[in-house]
Image (cartoon, helix red, strand yellow):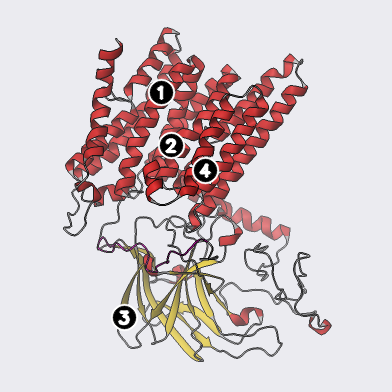
Amino acid sequence: MFFFILTNNNSNKMFFLFILFFSTLISISSNSWFGCWIGLEINLLSFIPLISNSKNLLSVETSLKYFLTQSLASINFLFMILIKFSLLKNFNMNNIISIMMNSSLLMKMGSAPFHFWFPNIVEGLSWMNNFMLMTWQKISPMILLSYYFNKNFLIFMIIMNLIIGSLGGLNQTSLRKLLAFSSINNLGWMIFSIMISENLWLFYFLIYSMMIFMMISLFFLMNMYFMNQLFINNMNFFIKLNLLINFLSLGGLPPFMGFMPKWIIINFLLINKFYFLTFIFMMTSLIIIYYYIRIIYSSFMFNYFKMKWVNLLMKNNMSLINLSSFISISSMILSTFIFM
Amino acid sequence: MSLLKTNVITSVKYLRSFSVLCRKSNQDHHLKKCPILFNTQRWLFWERHRKGGYDTTIKTSNWEHLKNGLVELKHELKLFAKELKELYDMDPLLIARPGEIDLLWCFNSPTVLEKFVTTCDSDHGEGYSSCNLEMSPAGRALFHGYLDTRVPKDGRIKKAGYCAMRSKMQRKSFKRASTFDWHLYNTLVLKVRGDGRAYLLNISTEGYYDITWNDIYHYILYTRGGPYWQVAKIPFSKFVLGSKGRLQDKQTRMRFDKVTHFGISCGDKIVGKFNLEIEYVGLEFDPTHDEEFAYEMYKTDKYIVAV
């Protein structure tokens, strides 16, 4: 990402990325809720210039929509913080205030039932901006969520996230929207892991970011935004194989890397007898893997036309592809040698 | 004449300047009773009305609205059931096969003509042209009329002479606005039989905000007169961006995922009859066409504004 920015002579983006990085740190390390809010606002302020590109009408519209939804959530959060301060000794209101604060943070993240802006905006952004939106922008709301959450409310939200993330992606033809719904589903897993322990959340988040980075870098290099481009381009066999491995890893299928964090969460769920929740986690994962396999199967089987004059960038630079496939296949097994 | 008949405007609609930042350009009192808005000098980009201030509503009473609504309820419920079934099937169109033309409108029956609306400058007293969209003797749609560039002598209008047909807004069930999704395609295909005049193809992609409400992508279609049909295949990369008719300095590529209207207009300043017979309008995916956008935007230094 940095390399891409440096090569484009775009020092403005570097500046805003720097502020974005620090805003998250401000948000999670502040002593007071007010400082958290400040971090969230600076986050919004620095992200908007990164995504608005005045040469493209669609990205302008997208950045305005992003601004409106995020500022609404921020206003809500600030108001709830102020109410909390003023009603400090009134413990009856704690439940309601925690629900409202959690709702505003969930809206910031794009979690169900406040997810309606998320696929829309992801559709309007380029791949690199999507990567930032799906990974970095989730950190500060999630950590703030871990500071003051309402357990029953969050479990209900998790169930909604899982169901909406799995069912929403079934009828999609745009790769961006597909990854958006997959992100909503993974948010469900991540919110649950926050309720278990922050360490586990960090582990899940890092692995998720790595997987998403591999997928997005593949789509970015191939310049693919829609499913029909998967079938039409003359892809190398190894690129298709990489697609298979990464998609299945994202879906959480063993022996790929993506299975590891899900395994630990399911372990916790079953030890603590959350059987119904386990069932929902499993079933929704199944639906997600179904639509990933639909894409991979089609890309392997459809043999459209191999046009000689269509030149693919990837033919000369396979090292990233090979590295990502290797990491996805072997990390789970190698990690057992290191840690266990 | 337009397919959407407007009542004779008896009530006067005199839209005043809506902001202190606007100045009225014409202070004459004897022009107070004109039925359209003054062309005030605008210093803002804000669009108050989607239709640009032209009043095209048909005045019906609430009781009539209710009766019409009940009649349409059955039809809308059927549409809703169809949508739910499509959602349940979960089988979206994934590929547009090359060489196949997916037709948007095939003008072989009069019912298809109801999906279009014709407009011309005489509708609101801005000119003397007339147009009509009917079935031709050959069984296809015929967009014909008379283009007149005479300016009405009221001093309001400087130029006149346009006739246009435009598709109605796509609707889902219960009159929800919907859009075309053309991301699978990259070429527009038209089979027409013209009269040698140049027509403008307009693709409108009204976005969410009012800044882009008037953004239309244009392409000039030159027709051959004569008894033979012509198939025009126009890639989307060749369309030029214009807003309210003015070509923009900063050109961008058309967005395919939310297209709202498609239209054809005639405004080539030649006084006389025009006839355009259309057989179909369709879309195609041409894999050999890999141009993203035909018009080059030169990289300028950052202190040069508006480019």
User: Quarter-wise, where is residue A295 in the image?
Assistant: top left
Residue B64: x, y in percent?
A: 69, 60
Camera-near label (2 vs 3) is 2
- Classify mark 2: helix, strand or loop: helix
Determine the CA span between mark 2 and mark 4.
27 Å
Q: Amino acid at mark 2?
A: Phe
Residue position for label 3: B229
In this view, B92 is above or below A136: below
Q: Which amino acid, mark 3?
A: Trp
Q: Are marks 2 and 3 in contact (CB under 8 Å)?
A: no
Q: Are marks 2 and 4 in contact (CB under 8 Å)?
A: no
Between the residue at mark 1 and the residue at mark 2, the CA separation in whole angstroms equals: 17 Å
Residue B301 visible to an observer of this rendering: yes
Q: Tell me, for residue A16, which label it has, or none.
A: 4
Element type at marker 4?
helix
Label 1, secondary structure: give it.
helix
**Residue at mark 2 shares a chain with residue at mark 3:** no
Please state the chain letter of the residue tagged with numbered disc 4 in the rendered image.
Answer: A
Q: Nearer the viewer, mark 2 or mark 4?
A: 4
Q: Position of residue A227 (x, y in %)?
A: 32, 47
Three-letter amino acid code of the residue under disc 4: Phe
| Residue A301 x/y as whole percent | 19, 43
Instruction: State which region is magenta.
Output: B286-302
Label whose residue precedes the other's in the sequence (1 or 2): 2
Q: CA distance from mark 4 to mark 3?
A: 56 Å
Q: Are labels 1 and 2 on one chain?
A: yes
